[in-house]
């Protein structure tokens, strides 16, 4: 009897984690839909690199602002309708991209995609925190991170193959179809996503409570530090994602293919690290895991900056750095949960996750502005020093969050 009672929560947790993970994979897939089509969009519309890049700036700006706003809505009406809306917006963005006739329509498609992307962190993490058994939260966050990496990994294969074989418009429609499949699955199992027991708040009107709670979130030192942490660590990742291949090629005389493989090794190492991180997130204090793993990554960045590494060792070093950073992922998400629970209780998950994770978009949007001039000046070693500096500052901010957050808040 006890085994069957235990099996039900386990099955429920597995379904919730799988549903949210699949939706998260689709959102990450859409991160790359437009940039992967640049080789077709640029000649089709006569775009410069600056104009093409501006499309992704629109995506991340809308997504960053939208995350904070989506968090408010999640706390007001629950995660499920917000998640549904986000998936449908992604599907709409694929259609708009597929029928685009000019640059303005491309901008609209990018903006709609950013709006769709904005809902996933506040909605996903609120569902996970409210629906998954506490003992399995570390694994839930691990799967969530892994699914995002899977979406990134699948996008180049699907979009490039379809665009090559059938044209970029068909590729855009194919992305839209993927989002619709995700929506159909979420809707069919919508009962597993219900978190509408959300908020028990007292006093004043609903609007007043929302306003006060929002400003309380923005004034919370722990939440602000979480935002800073995400901005710093994502700016470092943005530098690696955009420029590490070029920097390694120049510094270590690697071929373009070998340098690109080093970035792939970093991403694959990160995925493996996330899987391991789900097992260690509850065994030690989250901020200590974060500090140890990211500091290890910063040391490897400095080693690569020195230029003394032999060429064959660059790829395994990148993989090991990614592995270390990846281990910190689930602990990072649990640390945000601690900060949210300590300051505001469960009613605040949407707002806290929405605001904090908008730091991801801010970091990704800022990284090219910081590191582009460094690369243009040929200061390739400086890139790695700057990455290490950002990672070190991220460690410092995580430790400060840990000092303020209740260790029992997870």
Image: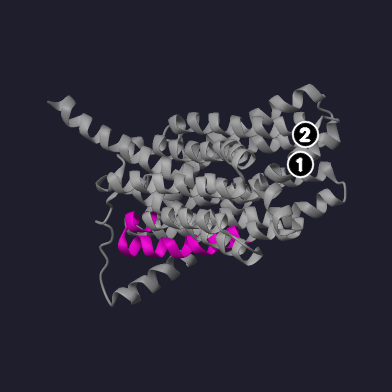
- Please tell me whether mark 2 sits on a helix, a strand or a loop: helix
Give the image quarter of residue 166: top right
Q: Quadrant of residue 266?
A: top right
**Spot occupied by residue 149 in the image (x, y as percentages of width and height):** 54, 38
Label 1 crowding class (10 Å Cα cut-off): few <14, some 14-19, many 20+? many
Counting from the top left corner in percent of width and height, residue 216 is at 43, 67
Residue carrying label 1: 384
Dominant secondary structure, magenta: helix
Residue sitting at x 42%, y 53%: 87
Between 187 and 47, the one nearer to me in the picture? 47
Report whether 126 appears left or right of 239: left
Crowding at mark 2 (Cα within 10 Å: few <14, some 14-19, many 20+): many
Q: Position of residue 341 (x, y in %)?
A: 37, 53
Is residue 53 in sight in this rendering?
Answer: yes
Q: For the residues marked 2 and 1, what is the alpha-carbon distance in whole angstroms? A: 7 Å
Q: Which residues are magenta?
A: 58-83
Describe the element under mark 1 as helix, strand or loop: helix
Q: What label does residue 304 carry, if any?
A: 2
Residue visible at 57% across and 36% down? 153
The residue located at (24%, 47%) in the rendering is 191
């Amino acid at each position: 009897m006890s085994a069957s009672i235990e099996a039900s929560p386990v099955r429920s947790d597995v379904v919730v984690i799988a549903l949210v993970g699949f939706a998260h994979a689709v959102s990450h897939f859409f991160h790359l839909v437009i940039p992967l089509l640049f080789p077709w969009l640029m000649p089709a519309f006569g775009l410069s690199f600056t104009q093409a890049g501006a499309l992704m700036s629109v995506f991340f700006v809308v997504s960053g602002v939208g995350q904070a706003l989506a968090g408010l809505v999640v706390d007001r009406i629950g995660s499920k309708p917000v998640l549904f809306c986000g998936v449908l917006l992604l599907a709409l963005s694929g259609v708009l991209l597929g029928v685009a006739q000019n640059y303005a329509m491309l901008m609209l498609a990018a903006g709609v995609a950013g709006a769709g992307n904005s809902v996933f962190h506040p909605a996903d993490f609120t569902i996970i925190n409210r629906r998954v058994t506490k003992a399995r939260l570390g694994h839930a966050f691990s799967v969530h991170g892994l699914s995002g990496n899977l979406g990134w990994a699948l996008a180049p294969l699907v979009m490039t193959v379809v665009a090559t074989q059938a044209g970029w418009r068909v590729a855009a429609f194919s992305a839209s179809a993927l989002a619709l499949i995700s929506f159909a699955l979420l809707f069919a199992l919508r009962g597993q996503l219900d978190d509408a027991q959300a908020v028990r708040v007292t006093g004043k009107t609903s609007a007043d409570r929302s306003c006060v709670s929002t400003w309380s979130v923005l004034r919370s030192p722990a939440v602000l530090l979480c935002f800073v942490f995400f901005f710093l660590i994502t700016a470092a990742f943005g530098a690696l994602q955009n420029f590490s291949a070029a920097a390694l090629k120049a510094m270590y005389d690697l071929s373009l293919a070998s340098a690109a493989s080093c970035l792939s090794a970093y991403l694959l190492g990160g995925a493996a690290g996330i899987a391991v991180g789900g097992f260690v997130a509850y065994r030690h204090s989250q901020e200590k895991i974060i500090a140890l793993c990211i500091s290890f990554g910063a040391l490897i960045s400095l080693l690569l900056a020195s230029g003394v590494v032999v060429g064959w060792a660059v790829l395994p070093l990148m993989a090991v750095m990614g592995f270390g950073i990846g281990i910190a992922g689930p602990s990072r998400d649990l640390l945000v949960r601690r900060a949210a629970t300590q300051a505001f209780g469960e009613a605040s998950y949407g707002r806290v996750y929405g605001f904090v994770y908008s730091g991801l978009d801010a970091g990704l949007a800022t990284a090219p502005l910081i590191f582009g001039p460094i690369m243009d000046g040929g200061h390739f070693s400086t890139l790695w020093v700057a990455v290490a500096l950002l990672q070190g500052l991220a460690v410092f901010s995580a430790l400060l969050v840990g000092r303020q957050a209740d260790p029992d808040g997870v």
